[in-house]
Amino acid sequence: MWENVNAMNSSQGKKGRPRKHPVLNGPFNDLIFDAMRREGIDTLDKFADKHGIGRTTLRNFVMGRQSPIGTWVKPELTTLIRLSKALNVPLFYLLERLYNDLDHEIYMFPSAPVVGWVGAGPGQDEAISEVALPLPLDSFLKGSFVAFAVRGNSMCAGSKPICDGDYIIVNKSLSVSPGQRVVARLKDGSYVCKLYRVDRTGRYLVSTNPDYENGTPSVIPAKDVAELVGPVVEIRKPE
């Protein structure tokens, strides 16, 4: 059963000849091989496929791919999360093996970076107190998330109001549908949160609270929109 893995680890060729197999010095090899034994899996590719990890990515883990200065090449956090679940070990345990400078805890856990304001008008360049918003692991694995701080009350109406001071989380990997609350980037570079509406006259972004004005019109036509970032999937009220 273990011919494939053991063959990879046989790296001492005869003197004067190139190595037939590379040296395996990956930071997680003991954990990976133990997990493969427990699950009765005899190849890295099968283990990668079972747990949704890229085959090349897993082989790089086992090979111990390093940068020119000798540090581990850092994988994406999503990949580390999948690997931690596959190995049944805490994510922090894997991070400790990769990083020597874990100064900022926000990079150790699933999160959505707060990338700017929506509806801020002239205040779009003001500092934001939050760096990132933590996300549940299951949610984090199902999309690409960013967060925005809300300025103004143009969307502070209806069953799920988005009000001044709130934070909203957007899933960039989801397509936008009519009737959803979305974040859009306008052609002037500013960001807005509006209701996406489509009717026989065209496509629009509209406010749910049109009586409130915060520097942007309550109805924005599609011609003024550069990009629909994505639908709003969560609203977080300030603590």
Image (cartoon, rainbow, N blue to C red):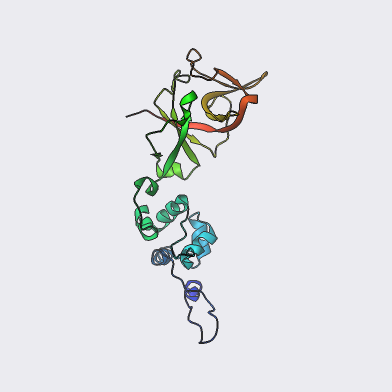
Q: Nearer the viewer, residue 80 or 17?
A: 17
Visible residue check, residue 120: no
Q: Horizontal placement of 227 versus 86: left or right?
A: right
How far across and down, in percent of the image, does residue 42 sit?
48, 68
Residue in the foreground of this view, choosing between 160 and 216: 216
Q: Where's residue 21, x and y in %?
A: 52, 76
Residue 213 versus residue 76 in the image, above or below: above
The residue at the point 48 percent across, 81 percent down is: 12
How many numbered marks, from 0 up? 0
Q: Considering only vertical position in the picture, is 129 above or below 202?
A: below
Give above or below for 66 relative to 233: below
Q: Is residue 93 left or right of residue 144?
A: left
Q: Residue furthest top?
A: 211
On-image quarter of the C terminus:
top left
Quadrant location of residue 196? top right
Judging depth in this view, the residue of 200 and 17 nearest the camera is 17
Q: Nearer the viewer, residue 41 or 72?
A: 72
* Residue occupying the far left of the picture: 239
Residue 116 in the image: above or below residue 68: above
Q: Position of residue 235 (x, y in %)?
A: 42, 29
Is residue 148 visible in the rendered image? The answer is yes
Q: Quadrant of residue 129?
A: top left
Residue 195 % position (x, y): 54, 23
